[in-house]
């Protein structure tokens, strides 16, 4: 059996390449805006950011599709930015409810 020429391995389909390009573009734009990226999850099309940055982007009306997901210990927020999901969490504290208890 003779040696064959190696073929390049194509792992990116055109659709996946386009999605990854959009994801990278959004991540770069956020970094240029001063947003700190805490987690980069390209397979989930999600970037985890700091709560302050998420609130700032919302105040500047740069996001859409705001969703709030409360749980026992924290609240998770998600929005869309340039087709990419941004996520941040805020802890729920006893102090948040201290004024309503008394």
Image (tube, helix red, strand yellow):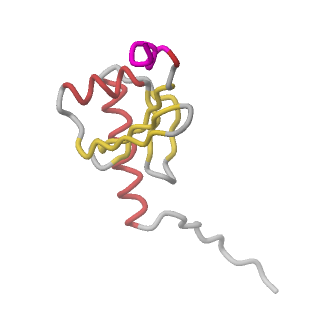
Question: Which one is in front, 10 or 82?
Answer: 82
Quarter of the picture containing the N terminus is bottom right
Q: Quadrant of residue 33?
A: top left
Question: Which one is in front, 7 or 77?
Answer: 77
Is the residue 43 above or below the residue 60 in the image? below
Residue at image x 18%, y 26%? 60
Q: Furthest-bottom residue in view?
A: 1
Is the residue 54 above or below the residue 46 in the image? above
Q: Residue 85, image x and y in percent?
A: 37, 45
Residue at image x 35%, y 23%? 53
Question: Which one is in front, 33 or 88?
Answer: 88
Question: Which one is in front, 44 or 20?
Answer: 44
Q: Does 78 sit left or right of 9 as displayed?
A: left
Residue at image x 37%, y 20%? 52
Magenta stretch: give its range: 95-102
Q: Does 17 sit left or right of 92 as displayed?
A: left
Q: Quadrant of residue 17?
A: bottom left
Q: Quadrant of residue 15?
A: bottom left
Q: Residue 96, image x and y in percent?
A: 44, 18
Q: Residue 87, image x and y in percent?
A: 42, 38
Q: Main secondary structure of the magenta part?
A: helix
Residue at image x 20%, y 25%? 59
Q: Furthest-front residue in view?
A: 102
Q: Is residue 101 magenta?
A: yes
Quarter of the picture containing the C terminus is top left
Q: Is residue 94 magenta?
A: no
Is the residue 52 above or below the residue 8 in the image? above
Q: Furthest-left residue in view?
A: 61
């Amino acid at each position: 059996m003779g040696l064959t020429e190696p073929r390049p391995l194509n792992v990116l389909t055109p659709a996946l390449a386009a999605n990854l390009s959009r994801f990278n573009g959004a991540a770069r734009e956020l970094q240029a805006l001063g947003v700190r990226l805490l987690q980069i999850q390209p397979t989930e099309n999600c970037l985890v950011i700091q709560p302050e940055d998420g609130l700032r982007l919302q105040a500047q009306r740069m996001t859409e599709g705001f969703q709030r997901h409360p749980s026992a210990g924290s609240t998770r927020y998600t929005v869309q930015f340039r087709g990419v999901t941004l996520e941040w969490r805020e802890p729920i504290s006893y102090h948040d409810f201290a004024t309503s208890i008394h």
